[in-house]
Image: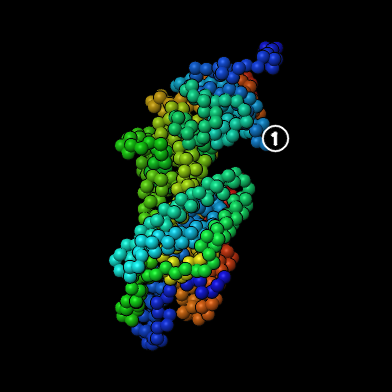
Amino acid sequence: MTSGFKLASIASKFMPREKSMVKPRNAGMMLEVDDLVVSYGAIKALKGISFGIAKGEIVSFIGANGAGKSTLLNSIASIVEKSAGSVFFEGRNITHSKTNDIVKSGICLVPEGRRVFADLTVDENLDMGAYTIDDKKVIDARKEEMFSIFEILKARREQKAATLSGGEQQMLAIARALMSSPRLILLDEPGLGLAPLMVEAIFRIISDISKKNDVTILLVEQNAKMALKASTRAFVMESGNIVLEGSGDELLKSEKVRKAYLGE
Amino acid sequence: MVANVICPVRIAALHAPCRQGFFGIMASFFQHFINGITLGGVYALVALGYTMVYGILKFINFAHGDILMWGSYVGLFTYNAIRGSAGPGAFSIFAFFVAMLVSCVFCALLGMSVERVAYKPLRKAERLAPLLSAIGVSYFLSNAAQLLFGTQSRKMDYPFDNSPISFLSVSITPHQLMVLAVSAASMAFLIFFINKTKTGKAIRATSLDQDAAALMGINPDRIISVTFAIGSVFAAIAGMLVSLDIKIYATMGMMLGMKAFVAAVVGGIGDIAGAVLGGIMLGLLETFGIAVLHIPVGYKDSIAFVVLILILIVKPSGILGKNIREKV
């Protein structure tokens, strides 16, 4: 492993590759992230992360507070500036696209802490989720679909989002993101601050959505057990690097993960 | 500041004979009420521009009053050009509203350009930077006007006969009626726009959480431009309304802008209903302050700032404002 890595880095030093000839390492995947670096001032939050996600997968990133999980999602969505590296979505380079253009290309981020529009009603929040859609009929059909997945939202339709409980707000945040029919959805700590039963409900919905709506899901979560159970593939992050990769089941069984993240 | 400036809407019955008895008192009350609410309508129109921009960018556009002044000049020139030598009447009224439209378009473009040139490059800078830039733009606009249009003030003639109409010894001028109608219609339009249209909802969403709005596919730059355009259009309308009563000159926007800013802060800056409430309150306080408390007319302008000081002591977030914690 180590020697291979060394060879590669030496090779890259002495043989600068032609830019046009470089194919991202994870070419052919739906989302290709290559050597992504993000710095906040002198602090490097992401130290060159590369991975790919295939269509239809549920991929989770687990890790401790400050490992760089949220930064990863925020930088893919261009909310946080990238210092280096590249991001390709369905073959298109979105590294330097603006957040609102990334949404139009089919990626939607459900940010940490939900960030629903507190002063807008549930209905208006969903309208905002459908901002990129112009056809009113399509919007209404999407809304009905959301109300069938999240029944509680229908009852709360005319209420301001601020009056919802934490779990309901999380549902609204997910429904709002789904309104634009994204093909890839990024979920930042969907279980944060919720009661265990609610966390389970949210994760059940996430699995359902990925199957029924044909949405690929990338999620980061501190609740490692929940995330690993729901995922087809997972990565473990530590201080800005990926340190472990495997299927959800493999990582659930891995000694290191059990000790460090499952508290066993 | 010159004291004569600031009676944007001339009070119809300031020199009305003393009234006595219960009926007289009631008549006086309604008289002052109408005068106050007319004046307040103008303050509210201007305050809306401050509050909407603050809602989205969290900074005070100190050039707002100067945009109003430019709108008044452009409106005046258009009005005079169309009207020619026609006397008060239907054609002059038509000319006035065409001029108002031209003034609105001009101000919308001016407001958006100011944002693009002076504020957008500073969006990620420290919060003080765009504020200073706004003060710079304010001086630039008023000095440019002085250079181009001269230092003498100009007068816009009434497009109609402005003799007061009396009803049960309460009198109202046609101009006051127009101010009430136009400002009420403008505010009704804004409330509809902000609550029912897609762009309106996007403005509200962007002012609540800009990042989350971008995550909905909303282009914050576009929303900011639209907000400046709307605020400037309201300034243009207010400018046209007051220009019939006060003189037009290069620094006319200064005191009017300051008072409208006070109105926005008193109502709760960032809150649209708050700006309307603050504006109308300020108009009423000024008229009743003179009529009931017998504050000398020369000190009229001080009322707004006394109110500002009081509200900053009692409820700094304004009447309808929420206490918002700074995001870390």
* Residue type at numbered disc 1: Ala
Q: Is residue B189 left or right of residue A22?
A: left
Return the x and y of residue A32 as percentages of the image width and height.
53, 22
Q: Is residue B210 left or right of residue A37?
A: left
Instruction: Give the image quarter of residue B76.
Output: bottom left
Query: What is the residue that sits farthest to the left in this orientation?
Result: B90
Instruction: Give the image quarter of residue B104.
Output: bottom left
Q: Nearer the viewer, residue B153 or B322?
A: B153
> Does the rendering let one see residue A232?
no
Q: Is residue B75 above or below residue A259?
A: below
Kindly identify the residue that appears in the image at 62 percent across and 46 percent down.
B125
Q: Chain of mark 1?
A: A
> Does the rendering let one see residue A259?
yes
Kindly identify the residue that appears in the image at 59 percent across and 65 percent down.
B313
Q: Nearer the viewer, residue A2 or A37?
A: A37
Q: Is residue A238 above or below residue B76?
A: above
Return the x and y of residue B217 as percentages of the image width and height.
45, 37
Instruction: Please identify the quadrant where the C terminus of chain A is shown.
Output: top right
Counting other residues with Cα less than 10 Å from the Cα at mark 1, is it few (<14), some (14-19), or many (20 or more)?
Answer: few
Kindly identify the residue that appears in the image at 61 percent across and 23 percent down.
A35
Q: Nearer the viewer, residue B44 or A163?
A: B44
Instruction: Tell me the residue that label 1 is attached to.
Output: A42
Kindly identify the residue that appears in the image at 57 percent across and 56 percent down.
B140
Colouring scheme applied when the structure was drawn: rainbow
